[in-house]
Image: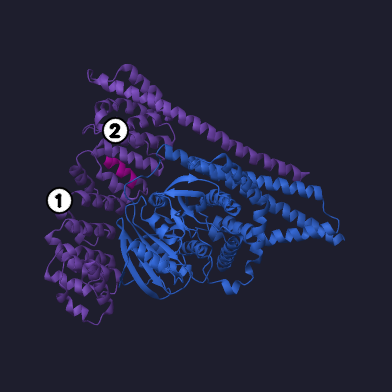
Amino acid sequence: MVINLLLYVYLFSCFALFIFNLLYMILSSFLNKRCHQKCSQYETQIMNESIYLQTHSKLSISHERYLLKRLRNINDLIAFNKALDHFEKKSVEPYLTQLLPIWQQLAVSYLKKDNMKKAFFAYVISKHGLYYGKEYRPLMQLLLQFLDHSTIYCRENVFKALCTLGNIQAVENMMNIINDKEWFHHQKLIADNLSVFQGDQELLMTRLWQHVNEWNDHLMVAVVQFISQKNGNFQQIFLPYLRSPQTSLEVRLAMIRYYRLHPYEPVREILYSFIDDTMIQDVSLTIVSAFALDHYPGNKTIELLKKALCHHNWYVRRNAAASLVHLKVAKKDLKDIYEGKDPYAKEILTYMYKKQEV
Amino acid sequence: MKTFELFLNVVNIFFFIYLLLYSTYLFVSVLIGANHLYKKEQMNVIRNQLTHDYYLPISLLVPAYNEEITIVDSIRSLVNLDYRLYEIIIIDDGSKDKTVQKLLEAFNLTEVSRPIHMSLSCAPLKKIYEGSVNHVSITLISKENGGKGDSLNMGINASRFPYFICIDADSMLQKDALEKIIQPVMEDEKVIAVGGLIRAAQCAELKDGKVIRYHMPMNPIVCMQAVEYDRSFLASRILMDQFNGNLIISGAFGLFKKDIVIACGGYDSSTLGEDMELVVRLHVFCRNNLIDYAIRYEPQAICWSQVPESMKDLCKQRRRWHLGLFQSMTRHYKIFMNFKFGLVSFISYMYYLFFELLSSIIEVFGITVMILSGLLGYLNIPFMIEFFLLYSIYGAVLTMTAFFQRIYIQHLKLTFTDVLKAILSCILENVFYRYILSFVRVTAFIGYKKRKHVWGSIQRYSQSS
């Protein structure tokens, strides 16, 4: 009896799950169709308002009210976002400029919603927001408030939105929060987001670098990577940090890569000291220095790279060989290696040169 | 007779608890799986994603043994992925057919004398060839035969990037598969491995890495595997992912952090289930060394892999899987009832032990008791038939739920005939297929010593028509 009852209870639950799935699918396809219709409506409205803005300085009050009322609903925001996607950003720029007060009011209402919805709101700002000037606006503060108890997606979209809005203080605050809360946000994501910052990037670099002694290594590596992509003016600033063993290893490695992209003569001796295996240091410094030295031609460079070909670490040998090839050192100048006793050095060098020839 | 009745009562209670636990597990896993996928779907719609132009560089390792039929198509599909920086390393494990020649002809590879950093031991190297297609570097390593794990170790040694993905030579990745499988790594620095979703390649037609048609083939063996894969990947793996408890990342498609795999000794070439063994070892290694880690499952990273088309090949494959499971479970027996391993021990290990490894023995034991009871007149045949039918319907409906949800989430379209075929496959899978496989698993140990180091070969079919 008990078994029978249990069997039927399980079977009922199982069918209930199946029916739930079916209903979900039907509801989703209905919502998709609705979204499509709404999207067309919004497209028409955006076009009409863009025409209206040619003769007026502000959006029509009715449209403003409509947006404020409707866009509080996530499905409407999805449709509105899709409608905006259909236009080239430049062609609707006057319209987007007028949206700022609406975004601000909507941000207040999205602040009360769950993380997924907050993340989407931030995504819409990142995509259709504009650089509204240097001023620190309430919208930025509201976006930062989205970060309380947030998910990684929410953080990412808020970060992107702040970079689109282009305010240095807001981005700095965001990074301060990531640092203080000890959140993991991949350095690659941070560096990529910073590189599309819409405001004054030069000033942003300087401001972010000022936190070198406050922020964790992770954030600082991202900052150095961002600077590396954009600017060669930090050569002098980075130098003492590269020299100092107190600077974290990851940051120093990022700096060596920076100096490869933006060669700076005073750093040459430091790179030489890193590749010199008589000095006691982390082997990662030697590996990356062997890689960076291909941008520092000279006899001593060649001598040190040749010596590095016999290093105990495989990656040092490989990078040294690659650098010698990039420096276009003639094979006759490497005779001592080819005729030497180290078969590994000979092997890696032969391979790199052949690869270059191919 | 009283003793036999007592024995039957004990058996009854055991099977009642066993089936109740399994049914509950199946239900909970499909429920959680469905919930997870709907949430993911919603997250995609409202852009809760980490979308960037470029992520982290990845090495794709493709071990191959006698894969002349599929290898060129597979590699062609791999050079057109939506991902900025990756390399492909094909490791030919001493094939006896024309695998190497086919690759050399198709991709214009040239022999090089590239030194390889042998961090992991593996069988001797014969030759290395290099080339590139669509700016993707291709390396072909020809080595002495040593098994799949050994080939993967060679691939790890030759790889240049910090993350590697192992892919079967008969598999094809969806265009966005790399972008999806790297997402958990971008989300959490603790992630050391990510498993992707495996689906039956015979059901899909791919063009430029995109599914242009999904259908249920005529072969019922393939259809049943298709629905079985969807249930197990939808349900079980998502459930175990909730508590970092996945013990398997399929060898057909999985991403690993290279340094930690090297630190724990790479793939074990002496086991048949090198994929499972590595994941279990990663759990053991990280827990023993107090490394904060996560092993994740990403159902949106999709790989289409050929499944066996004949019963003979299917039996061969499942025997290998079962032996692999046995080797992994026995080699890491210390996980059993060990508080240090938390839920990995008390849910994952227990599940694999009782519902995978021992299930075939339990099922055969049950059938034996049933026959014996029938002979002695203790069997309530109407109840038995009713129970069997209800249990089969239960399993079939859950499989259907998993299958159709997957079809919906991936925006695939099925014809009416395909829907019928799918429903029929779900029923047959629960009524016949699983019992046949139980028998195969029970007999897996026959000839175990002979087979324990050899590649599993199944009949391959070219993907290009």
Start and end of the magenta stretch? A170-179
| Percent x, y of residue B19 | 69, 52
Packing grade of label 2 (10 A; few <14, some 14-19, many >=20) is many
Q: Main secondary structure of the magenta part?
A: helix
Instruction: Specify the subunit that label 2 lies on.
Output: A
> Residue at the spot x=30%, y=44% of the render?
A176
**Quadrant occupied by the C terminus of chain A:** bottom left
The amino acid beneath tag 1 is Asn
Q: Disc 1 versus disc 2: distance between alpha carbons?
A: 30 Å
Q: Which residue is mark 1?
A: A233
Q: Which mark is residue B146?
A: none
| Percent x, y of residue B159 | 36, 64
Q: Which chain is blue?
A: B
Pick the residue in front: B404 or A182: B404
Pick the residue in front: B400 or A344: B400
Circles 1 and 2: CB distance less than 8 Å? no
Q: In this rendering, is residue B334 above or below A333?
A: above
Q: Nearer the viewer, mark 1 or mark 2?
A: 2
Quadrant of the rendered structure where residue B355 is? bottom right
- Does the image show residue A220? yes
Give whichever of discs 1 and 2 has the lower sequence position.
2
Instruction: Specify the subunit that label 1 lies on.
Output: A
**Quadrant occupied by the N terminus of chain A:** top right
Is B123 covered by the magenta stretch? no
Q: Which residue is mark 2?
A: A129
Pick the residue in front: B183 or B77: B77
- Colour of chain A, in one word, is purple
Please say which color scheme the image uses.
by chain
Q: In this rendering, is residue A338 above or below B457?
A: below
